[in-house]
Image: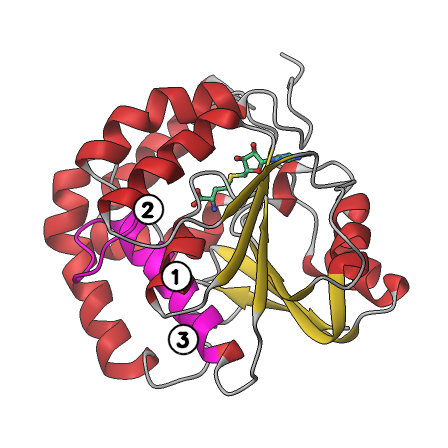
Amino acid sequence: MESKTKGSFEGWNEVWSSQSEQELTNPMYTESTPNTIYQFWQKGYANDLLALIKGKNYQSFCELGSGRGTTTMYLAKAGYEDLTMVDLAQQGFEIAQYSFKKHKLPMPKMVLENIEKTSLGDQAFDCIYNIGLLEHFDDPRPTLAESFRLLKPGGIIYMPIVPEQPVYKSIAQRLLFNPLALAKITAKSILKPGSKGNNINRTNYRRDFYSDICKDLGFKNVKCIPYNPYWKVNADGTVENKLTLPIYQWYYNTFKSKKTLSFETNTMFDLCFLLYAEK
Ligand SMILES: C[S@@+](CC[C@H](N)C(=O)[O-])C[C@H]1O[C@@H](n2cnc3c(N)ncnc32)[C@H](O)[C@@H]1O
């Protein structure tokens, strides 16, 4: 079936509606030690973003394609005040409003607009970020061009991109934690080639596709690096949370948390990419 989203907000309202109950009982944002793989990822991305902006005297932040705004919550918790979220899916903002209130975090500005062409002023922000956005666009260039326009000189973008990945990328983790899943995935790909879990478009562009666009738009110090070695390898959340996650947490706390970009990895293990650049 032809995807109906192609990087737009359509389809996302449905995603946020279906996840709103889960978000109330098992939210993405946590102020304690993460107890699901999703919380672990989100906290890791936020920690890396906080490490990148540390000491830079950045004041104004914008999450383009914010959804429920998990990363913006972490910035609010860290004391940043001038925070703007932009999205076209009202349902995501409703989850965000609930979550910010629940955690007694100051409410950011929420702008219901197309991120490819916003009404926000030129050079309005020191930092523009999002998590898991650009891979949903067949053409990410308008969003990156808008980011460039909105960014102040000296500002940065921070954008983890989660492309459609070949199974071989996760073989090491699956052999270690869930070898049965490898057999299942292989059988499924033979029986039902091309079958997808949901209706949201996910591209599989290479890293240099994104960095080339950024260089072309005028960004400086552009990097698109292999990122996040912590794959989800068990369909069953309980097994994942009790077995895989504690080992990941131990590894992260022992070896990774001391690095500036703690989710940086090598190309054999990357679940996603991190695109970051300066204006
Ligand atoms: C993967 S979600 C972001 C999730 C977010 N990181 C979080 O933790 O809640 C991507 C978001 O981008 C938004 N989006 C996609 N295309 C858009 C567009 N053209 N204009 C505005 N928002 C858009 C979707 O509505 C969706 O909420």
Say the numbered circle drawn on residue 7: none
Q: Which residues are magenta?
A: 29-51
Check whether the beta carbons of the residues at disc 1 and disc 2 lie within 8 A of each other. Answer: yes
> What separation in Å lies between label 1 and label 2 (alpha carbons)?
9 Å
| Left or right of 12 in this view: 251 | left
Nearer the observer, 225 or 269: 225
Closer to us: mark 3 or mark 1?
Answer: 1
Instruction: Report whether the residue tagged 3 is closer than 8 Å to ligand 1.
Output: no
Q: Nearer the viewer, mark 2 or mark 3?
A: 2
Q: Amino acid at mark 2?
A: Phe
Q: Quadrant of residue 152?
A: bottom right
The residue singled out by tag 1 in the image is: 76
Name the quadrant where ligand 1 sits. top right
- As measured in the structure, the alpha-carbon distance from the residue carrying label 3 to the one carrying label 1 is 21 Å
In the image: residue 32, left or right of residue 196: left
Residue labelled with disc 2? 100
- Up the image or down, 154 lies above or below 25; here it is below
